[in-house]
Amino acid sequence: MTSSRDKRRVAFGAAVGLLLFVLAEGVAHVAIGVVERDPRFDFTPIHERGRELQERLQRLLETQGEALVELDEAIGWRYRANYRGELYSSDSQGARGQREYPAVEPEGVLRIAAFGDSFVHANEMADADAWSAQLEALDGRVEVRNFGVGGYGTDQALLLHERLKDELDADIVVLGFAEVNYARNLNRFRRFLSVHELPLSKPRFKLDEKGELLLVPNPFPRRRDFEEMLDDPTLVLEAAPDDWFFEALEWRNPLYDHLAVVRLPSTLFARAWQSRLRPDGLYRGKVMNTDCEGFALLVALVERFAESVEASGREFVFMIFPTRDADVWGGGVRTYQPLLEALEDRDVIDLADPLSRAPEIRPENLREVVHYSAESNRVAALALRDFAVEKEWLEPR
């Protein structure tokens, strides 16, 4: 029979335990408030992510046919053809700019088609300040059809090129690369990679045992799939398989929303796992990890892109848009040095070199906010023009 003293001990122990829990919960809340100032960490509860997803999906669906971004069943999304906005415009094929190019390039003109992400598209810049438009302005013998699309991985650039390649009358095809593409190639739903991104989905490739590319389709190809998410945002979890950035510790944790003492360590461990602890992580030290899936996949995607271009009788150029100041001005080994070595037999323009040599480019004006400034885009235009002259694709002036 339990004595009254034992009952008091149990009650006292429970009270102490509750007090310690309340203290731990308070400390965790304070710690979250401090740590979340670092943009690498996001502690947004899952139910809030779902509410925000519904709001942004509603706007996305309501503006289809009017906004720049339009859903694409196979590729995930692309930029709408015949768009006219405050900064951006596109032609009848979705290439950037206000002019319509003839189906067959004029005699004496070197036509370039460029594919890639927002650095290729030159986001934040008006049409005339994009590197592609500046190259045309620098040399009237050159036409550039800019098919860059914000948020694209190398995989989506490849798929868009393969869709359009038979319609392109071009001499040179450029594949642009910014470091963020490295991660995007392993992602299927953008919000697994970055919590507050547009709620868009995409296909991705995997490598089989022989190193061949296998396509994992877009998990949400139909408009109806997104409409169903308006009623049930947990449907995003259907994109979790084969998404390298899906973190079950957050998305499938029943206590994540309710307890700060759970949310804090779960988020910290998830970020540490991705950035430092994964044995197959994207980076080894300060450079790309050549032993991880992401690196092998990136090289395979570039090689397939190059082979597709060359099979069409065109020249292939891989153009790197460095995004770290240290890669431009650091003077040491660049983050993507292993990629340069893997592609040493390809024609590569590393914009870190001309950017570092250009006296007008400094860390404070390299970017507008995130993407290249008008001055940096001009350096990119000059670099490609000079490379074409060096390769004798264009006569020197």
Image (cartoon, rainbow, N blue to C red):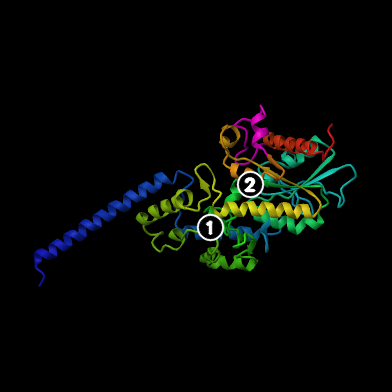
Viewer-nearest of labels 1 and 2? 2
> Which SS type dominates the magenta stretch?
loop
Q: Choose between 388 and 303: the one closer to the eye.
A: 303
Q: Which contiguous range is marked in magenta?
A: 350-373
Residue 213 in which image quadrant: bottom right
| Residue 277 at x, y percent in the picture | 44, 51
Circle 1: residue type: Trp
Q: Residue at x 71, y 59 (%)?
A: 65
Residue 153 position, x and y percent, is: 63, 53
Task: Kindly give the residue lying farthest to the bottom in the view shown.
Answer: 1
Q: Which mark sits nearer the N-terminus, 1 or 2?
A: 1
The image shows residue 98 at horizontal and vertical percentages of 79, 46
Q: Is residue 85 magenta?
A: no
Q: Callout 2 environment at 10 Å: few (<14), some (14 to 19), or many (20+)?
A: few
Magenta span includes 366: yes
Determine the secondary structure under disc 2.
helix
Image vertical order of residue 269 relative to residue 119, above or below:
below
Residue 197 appears at what percent x and percent y? 56, 53
Q: Quadrant of residue 166?
A: bottom right
SS for tag 1? loop
- Relative side of 152 to 287, left or right: right
Location of the N terminus (image quadrant): bottom left
Left or right, 266 with reference to 347: left
Q: How packed is label 1: few (under 14 Cα within 10 Å), some, or many (20 or more)?
A: some
Residue 118 visible, this angle = yes
Quadrant of the image containing the C terminus: top right
Q: Nearer the viewer, residue 201 or 307?
A: 307
Q: Residue at x 74, y 42 (%)?
A: 127
In the drawing, what numbered circle is on residue 342? 2
User: Which residue is denoted by mark 1 in the rendering?
Assistant: 244
What's under tag 2, amino acid-wise? Ala
Left or right of residue 15: residue 280: right
